[in-house]
Image: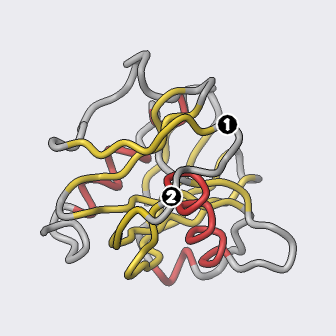
Amino acid sequence: MYSFFDDFGLPVTLTFDPKVFRQRTARHVLVFPFLEGKLLFTRHRQRGIELPGGKVEPGETSLAAAVRETFEETGYSLSAIEQIGQYVINDVIVKDIYVARVDRQVAEPAGADVEEALLFDVIPQYVKDNPHFSRYLYDDVYPLTLAHLRHHRFVTP
């Protein structure tokens, strides 16, 4: 279990232990989608480059939300997805973390706040304070999850 403060000064706990993350129901999701070793991002019109994610809609599972949000924000379909972690902000906002294998782009991003989908040939490891990236990636969730995923089967081509 990791504990730190996010870029807004709120306390965050992060776990990759299924025994822990299966105990809380998340109302938000964050997805790390990989296509042939490249990480798929979305460019939000106001916030900048970020990973797909968002709220779980009423009656929807977090898994379904992860698939839906990835499609809406990137236009890509997924061939596989699994939950690998969870983080909690200020002991209130619970977000499930998923890793996914991207299949292909089947549409343009449909989200009203989304400009485009982006694939990086080299995965950015450190984005804190980079004005091109969303502040939501400035905390330790992003680098710790990347480190956790280093040898995951969805990451390597």
Q: CA distance from mark 1 to mark 2?
A: 13 Å
Q: Quadrant of the C terminus?
A: bottom left
Q: Is residue 89 visible?
A: yes
What residue did someone put label 2 on? 75
Q: Is residue 78 above or below residue 34?
A: below
What residue did someone put label 1 on? 113
- Percent position (x, y) of residue 132? 41, 21
Seen from the viewer's position, the closer of residues 113 and 12 is 113
Left or right for 39, reference 36? right
Q: Is residue 147 above or below residue 9?
A: below
Helix, strand or loop at disc 2?
Answer: loop
The residue at the point 36 percent across, 52 percent down is: 40
**What is the crowding at mark 2: few (fewer than 14 residues within 10 Å), some, or many (at least 20)?**
many
- Percent position (x, y) of residue 26? 69, 68
Q: Nearer the viewer, mark 1 or mark 2?
A: 2
At label 1, the amino acid type is: Asp
Colouring rule applied to residues = secondary structure
Residue 63 falls in image quadrant:
bottom right
Q: Is residue 5 visible?
A: no
- Percent position (x, y) of residue 21? 55, 74
The residue at the point 51 percent across, 29 percent down is: 134
**Tally of numbered tags:** 2
**What is the crowding at mark 1: few (fewer than 14 residues within 10 Å), some, or many (at least 20)?**
some
Seen from the viewer's position, the closer of residues 108 and 33 is 108
Seen from the viewer's position, the closer of residues 117 and 131 is 117
- Percent position (x, y) of residue 66? 58, 68
Q: Is residue 114 above or below residue 138?
A: below
At label 2, the amino acid type is: Gly
Q: Are marks 1 and 2 in contact (CB under 8 Å)?
A: no
Q: Furthest-right residue in view?
A: 58
